[in-house]
Image (spheres, grey):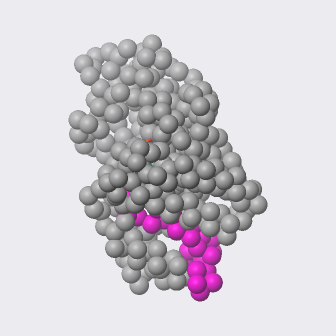
Amino acid sequence: MTTTVTAKAHTNIALVKYWGKKDAQLMLPQNGSISLTLDKFYTQTSVIFDNQLEQDQITFNGQTLTASKAQRISRFLDLVRQRSGQSAAAKVVTENHVPTSAGLASSASGFAALAAAASRAADMQLDNTALSRLARRGSGSATRSIFGGFVEWHAGHDDASSYAECLQDPVDWDVQMIAVVLKKTQKPISSTAGMARVVATSPYYPAWVQTANQDLVAMRRAIQARDLTTLGEIAETNAMRMHALNLSAKPAFNYFTAETLTAIQAVNDLRANGITCYYTLDAGPNVKIICAGHDTAMITRELSRYFDSEQLIVAKPGPGITISEN
Ligand code: 2P0
């Protein structure tokens, strides 16, 4: 087989978060999640299986990957080989299009693009639901990056029932995000390890699952009603509850820096002045602001009191996966 397949997947930001697994091997989450796929940040990955190769050859932005990252990708390729019957090693070339090393999660777009390119290169013809299930085995958040716009990942109870589906794409109303890209610091703990510690040690975990399930219902309604205020309120509360889990773990950890708190305060001040904007935070210091497109210029102007203009990236809802053979 000599076809090179290229896939492009965009990253997504969760509005109702995934933060804990109930099955680490199958990558089944404790609760469902809802996200918005963004246009600005994406990964493009090409895969070819080649009998001449002795082992998988993986490059990321022109560089050879570290052993541990390459191992995670090779393990994922093993799953594709096992399912497809393809036995050759693969050449994988990945380009991550995230402006100025933004430190925004790349595992979501990365494993979504890899799942699509590798499965097609191995001659599997998967529909988007099956692709979403496959991407999930690489990284939980990748489950959602198969689709554009607003997306829900159903937690499910086994491999077949845990997949994402599109809630709204195209997004036909005015909602955007501003990524506030903060100084990179050493991550205190990886997402995978952080969520495992929280599930194992936070006494608040059952309350998280219960409230996240309520948030899913309310968030679906807010998206359907195109209600930015309700959407933002749910997302902000949900994000802070996720981070409260981290503070309540043993040992406790958090992803905030002093700049994170500055950005949160700036959003609170804007809102006190009547601007509809809300923040959400993931497993890192960056803050993402949910707002209307017609307010982005004013919000970035206000934030430029604290941050450089290149730290403020405005993103719109983005598309789902695209695959091409060459
Ligand atoms: C999310 N995050 O829903 C949550 C919110 C970060 C905070 O999914 O272990 O890289 O590979 O499944 O998907 C980041 O964790 O973790 C994440 P694994 P992943 O977007």
Q: Is residue 307 above or below residue 97?
A: below
Residue 249 seen in the current view: yes
**Residue 291, x across and y down, in percent:** 59, 70
Q: Residue at x 34, y 73 (%)?
A: 258
Residue 112 seen in the current view: no
Look at the image and give the residue range highlighted in magenta: 271-300
**Residue 79, x across and y down, in percent:** 42, 23
Report the front residue among 147 and 15.
15
Report the front residue among 234 and 40.
234
Q: Quadrant of the N terminus?
A: top left
Residue 243 quadrant:
bottom left
Q: Is residue 226 above or below residue 1?
A: below
**Residue 69, x across and y down, in percent:** 29, 38
Q: Is residue 44 left or right of residue 93?
A: right
Q: Residue at x 44, y 45 (%)?
A: 199
Residue 31 quadrant:
top right
Residue 248 quadrant:
bottom left
Q: Does residue 39 belong to the magenta stretch?
A: no
Q: Is residue 81 above or below residue 305?
A: above
Q: Residue at x 61, y 34 (%)?
A: 156
The outermost residue toward the front is 203
Q: Is residue 315 left or right of residue 149?
A: left
Q: Residue at x 42, y 81 (%)?
A: 304
**Residue 128, x across and y down, in percent:** 61, 33
The outermost residue toward the bottom is 273
